[in-house]
Image (cartoon, grey):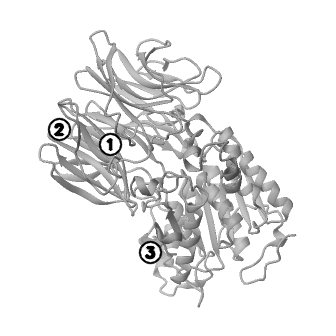
Amino acid sequence: MVLVLQGCGQPAQEQQALADNEQRISAAYGSWVSPLGAAEVYGSASAIGELQSVGDAIYFSESSPAEGGKVGIKRLEKDGSITSVVAPAFGIGSRVHEYGGGDFLGIGQSLFVTKGQDQLFYRIAPNQEALALTPNGTRHGECISYPKGSRIICVREDHRQPGEPKASLVTINLNFSGEGDIFVDGHDFISSPAINADNTQLAWITWEHPNMPWDNTQLWLGDLNRKGQLTNIRQIAPERKGALMQPLFSPNGVLYFIADYDNWWNLYRLDAKGDIEQVTQLKAEIGGPAWKLGQHAYAFENENTLIASFNKEGDAGLLRLDLQTGVIEVLAADFADIKQVVQGADGVYFVGNRPTPERGIYKVSGRGTELVYAPKICGLDPRYISRAVNVEFTTKGGDKAHGYFYPPVNGDYQPLPDTRPPLLMMLHGGPTASANRAYDSAIQYWTSRGFAVFELNYRGSTGFGRQYRQSLYGNWGKVDVEDAVWAAGFLVDQGWVNAEKLAIRGGSAGGLSVLSALAFHDKFKAGVSYFGISDIEVLGKETHKFESRYLDQLIGPYPEMKAVYRERSPLYHLQGFNEPLLLLQGLEDKVVPPSQSQHIYKALKDKGVPTAFIGIEGEGHGFRQPHNKILALESELVFYGMVFDFTPAGTLPTLKLDNAEALVRPGQQAQLPE
């Protein structure tokens, strides 16, 4: 297919006029006019969520900026035509574990979906009103059919009783509303039900506090009798510890799964004797951390081959595995991110992102790998696109850390003589997550204005094996911050950025790193925290079930290690916090409550530090409404202009910065607050 990109920002004739001008404009970094506005970054681009094969078609979820970021479902036919089957206004989206996933299931002409607003599970059939099948106070996701046409099996999170919600696998009748029957319970968390082709075996994953699903999980297998009862339940290899995920039966009934027994997430299978056999031996990751339900990193082409995605140090690829010989054929290695690998009627489909604007749904077939559907995206002329440079650097203690450096690029501008660009050090959330080099309009927004960007994969990030992932355990708020400080020093030493204009930004767990970097170090000159954590001790008491014991791993058990929680919390260490800070916070956030931002804002304001707080009504953990994302991005640009003494181009919102008179311009002597 031909990828059609939307135009961005300036009218086409103005862009052409600039392109024809051989003399570049000399201007300060940060003040460059970019063809990419915040409205183009967030106001028009849609995003694909999950894929599912139903009959001869592929169903997929996609967000709609025109509907405030709400998610609908579309159908991709074999001929490439697209039909909307659930309008975005319906707003599908599960909140199991708060992060959701596994939002819909297609059976025949019907779709079964979770509605975001009320969390009820609905049947949507042609020419019928949507029918709610589940009771209030319950959440459902990751459903599978059993047997076809009469019942489905779902992960349920039951919030109807006081205390922690209860996890279970339940069966739901497709034809009428009701309580449903509990299939499996008795565990803190349950996910990933998978059934074999003849409906005689069911597999699933469980884990218990204080583990997260990327720490230690259990794989279970049970037999299904003719009455639909689950019998002969047994745990697979209980003596082996690891993060097991994504069980899936092959067409001939062999159970496959992903595990990190050898440090890397590889494929395994259960042989005829009930023993575990390792299928791949990659020094790379198949799959990623299970923050959401409904992830699929591999699918079977047929009884003899499967297709799997893999990730190594932030780069993604696709492989074909011969199940008989073990021979691996690499089909593609030029992706930045691959998700939702599913078997369709005419090939294997997946969602792929590249370092260039080509992104969407791809198909693997006898003709190779082809892009079959591309959502709307704001495409830039190559003269404005910054390409990532993969960087490995030595951090504190001699360890290695990683990241992607994006230099400032704008075909119409050149910097003033003898200047270096300001740096935006970007920290991913999680913290068990990662940055990759996928084309991101939000990054290009900054680089096309004259900023350098560094996306850091600090120790603890995924894609580098279990050992690297767990190097953050016991050290959160410490090694992630050290890596940010050392990365900034490395970039300064290389001569790539201005040492007096170093900013650090991040969200959620990345927001904690931002606040800690400013509280405990003096490397950065400004910070921006999106729904960040300032008081780790309080977070552990207020957050939701899924992450309620996450801190046991990241820091240590509470209250036994209460002193360390205090020691790592920026809110209690503001004596060295003197640099300007912008805080952005959703006021409906259930993961990191607004008080986390509000308390440090008040404390810094009272201390005399230049500080701004933007609380956004109706937003939770991660902004969804395009107009709120636009406000946040533009306010951030205004903030950097105030701190680094440049005038951003364009019409931008006014930012109220408390204690603005205390701003120290680059090169000036700081006057520390008393």
| Disc 2 secondary structure class | loop
Report which residue position mark 2 lands on. 302
| Disc 3 secondary structure class | helix
Query: Given the image, on which type of amino acid does mark 3 rest?
Result: Arg
Asked whether residue 11 is in view, the answer is no
Single out the mark in the foreground, 3 or 1: 1
* C-beta proximity under 8 Å, tags 3 and 1: no
Report which residue position mark 3 lands on. 383
| Disc 1 secondary structure class | strand
Q: Residues within 10 Å of mark 3 (few under 14, many from 20)?
A: few
Image spot of residue 11 (x, y percent): 53, 66
Query: Given the image, on which type of amino acid does mark 2 rest?
Result: Asn
* C-beta proximity under 8 Å, tags 2 and 1: no
Residue ID at (17%, 38%): 302
- Please state, as top left, top right, bottom left or bottom right, where the C terminus lies in the image: bottom right
Q: Is residue 535 left or right of residue 65?
A: right
- Check residue 446 in the rendering and tell me which mark sits there, or answer none: none
Residue ID at (65%, 47%): 561
| Residue in front for this viewpoint, 255 or 302 | 255
Asked whether residue 301 is in view, the answer is yes
